[in-house]
Image (cartoon, helix red, strand yellow):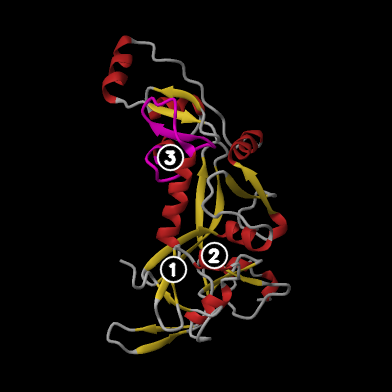
Amino acid sequence: MRRASIPPYKDSLLSNRPGEKWDDIPGLDGYFRVSNFGRIKRMEREMVHTNGSIYLLKEKILAPRLQHSPNLTMKDQTHQLAAHLCLERRRYHFPIRRLVYTCFVAPIALDDPEINIVSRNGNGLDIHPRNLLQIQRNAMMKRVYQRGRVISSFVGKPNTPGVEASLKVTCKPVSQYDRKGKWIRTFPSMMQASRETGIRHGQISHSANGIEPTAGGFYWRHGKRRKWDLEKFLEERRLSFKEKKGMKVTQLTLSGEPIAWFLTLNDAGKALGKSYTAISAMLRGKTKTAYGFKWKKGFYGKK
């Protein structure tokens, strides 16, 4: 089979495809790379076995996960490609189109809930930079409605005293906020919110419980609070993302004294006004120092 006929996400050959370029995945630089075709490469590195022996983990193209999302309105499916990576017993999950966009179109915060990256032609498997579009969540939902892929169902208020009484006892209110954190409306239950907005109950639940930042382009919180600190929520989420997925690194003097700690390599580079690639190279054993300092993975010597 000719290579040109193989979709990039199925291509496991290490050699480059025509026109293929590579860049480090932010936060995992030096360990994993992404190409402008959406292929994911694990870089060669040494590993320590549980018995203490050292072995070489070879360079490899990693197969992405193909995710299917059924559309009940159109009775078809949409497809998305995701990278599920593991480094030092920690797992990282990224939509590959976001990685391609931030590395080859324009830098974005990978955890920013207001930024969504979509395929211009609607094909979730076509994630070449020229086919990717940055769009806000509310505009994305409008796009979905315009394409007829979601039809908002209208259900009126409960029409019997029994249903109303049941809702008061068994359902918890949930509040809806716009992308600026402004209160829009409080619903008696998540199910009622789903019926009146057309947004899936499970998505609203995930947002209200903090599993996902938004649902349908809106923020959701349990209860009837009209005032909600969006900035605090986003800052806590960004910090949590760094703590969970960033590579912690310690800056040391040449004599080995720790002087600073960073949640990510990128933060370390920014603090020095330099690129983090030299720090990454030192951590991989390519150099002995970077920018006049020694560096160690993790928070070394911090009380």
Q: Looking at the image, is mark 3 or mark 2 earlier in the sequence?
A: 3
Q: Disc 3 residue type? A: Ser
Q: Disc 2 residue type? A: Ala
Residue 237 shown left or right of residue 1 in the figure: left
User: Mark 1: which secondary structure?
Assistant: strand
Is the residue marked by circle 1 packed among few (<14), some (14-19), or many (20+) residues within 10 Å?
Answer: some
Residue identifier under label 3: 207
Q: Disc 1 residue type? A: Ala
Q: What distance separates the C-alpha of mark 3 from that of mark 2?
A: 33 Å
User: Mark 3: which secondary structure?
Assistant: helix
Residue 82 shown left or right of residue 275 in the figure: left
Q: Position of residue 255 (x, y in %)?
A: 42, 84
Q: Splitting the image into 4 quarters, where does residue 131 fall?
A: bottom right
Q: Nearer the viewer, residue 281 or 262?
A: 262
Q: Nearer the viewer, mark 3 or mark 1?
A: 1
Q: Which mark is residue 271?
A: 2
Residue identifier under label 1: 260
> Which is the main secondary structure of the residues drawn in magenta?
loop
Q: Nearer the viewer, residue 92 or 146?
A: 92
The segment highlighted magenta reads 206-230
Q: What distance separates the C-alpha of mark 3 from that of mark 1?
A: 35 Å
Q: Splitting the image into 4 quarters, where does residue 259 fall?
A: bottom left
- Res 228 seen here: yes
